[in-house]
Amino acid sequence: MSSSLDSGSDHSDVSMEPSVKLPLPLDREIEKQPDLPDDWKPPSRFSVWLCFTAICYFSVGKPNLEQLWQEVREEGWKKRNERFRTVVWTSLCMQGLALFWYIRLILRPPQIKIVENVSTVHYDSLVFLSCVFSMYGLLYHVLFWRSDAAIELHETINQRMQKPFHLSRRRVLTHVSFIRMTTLTAVCSMGCLAGGFISIILGCSLFTSLAAAGAISLLLDAIMWMDDLAALLVYPLAFITWFGLGMRYVNMTHSH
């Protein structure tokens, strides 16, 4: 009888094991992926490694792609790419806002001297730079969405053929570089436009206007890569400040 009890306990233990140790689907997907694909590792040649490291620092802020690969393993490429798309859509809204103000300023140019003894040369130069950055930004948006569509097609084919996720190092670097260029051109466009407002409203010199444009660009760039909670707090403050400069300029033009 004891043997029957022992056998029964063995069966119960065996039947309970799958329910306890059954991995989640995400865990199984992670287990299928290697630690780091060989194609994502830094190249061996020094000159190529130097270029690879520079591009990684520029695009993802790291010397290699290891952290990005860990995020892909934990979240999956689709979820990680959705975060990339959110950043790109944010930069597109910023560039659209900058272009709106540029058109607004063309249709209603400022007076020759809003502030006494202040020339509009600095203002005109910074506003023109803002437009140039916006145009280049739109080009990089087109390139990003083209790269995104190609990667999605590649991933869909791999899923249908039941193959693991795989992207070449060159395609990944190209994709994240386009993302970085869209954000960089967007913050530079907004920074130059804000610097132009500051130069014409406050009567600043060229150096002060450029310094303000650079500081605002760096601030916006830092905000775009913040966590969600911090961004929710800082985005409205930055928008109110920038919008206040624009409204101040409009009031000054109407009063003259």
Image (spheres, rainbow, N blue to C red):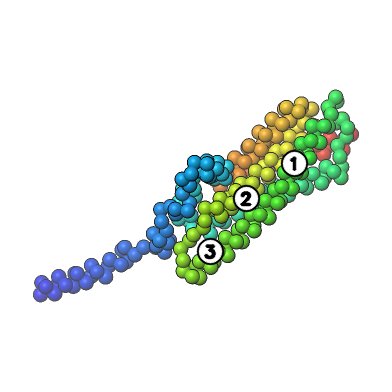
Badge nearest the viewer, 1 or 2: 2
Question: First in sequence: mark 1 or mark 3?
Answer: 1
Q: Which residue is mark 2?
A: 178
What residue appears at the point 58 percent right and 65 percent down from the top-left corner?
153
**Which is more toward the observer, 248 or 123?**
123
Q: Quadrant of the N terminus?
A: bottom left
Amino acid at dot 3? Glu
**Which is more toward the observer, 50 or 195?**
50
Q: In the shown orientation, is residue 131 left or right of residue 236?
A: right
Q: Position of residue 181 (x, y in %)?
A: 64, 46
Q: Which mark is residue 155?
A: 3
Graded by Cα atoms within 10 Å as few (under 14), some (14 to 19) or many (20 or more), the crowding at tag 1 reads: many
Q: Which residue is mark 1?
A: 130
Amino acid at dot 1? Ser
Residue 57 in view of the camera: no
Q: Position of residue 195 (x, y in %)?
A: 73, 34
Amino acid at dot 2? Phe
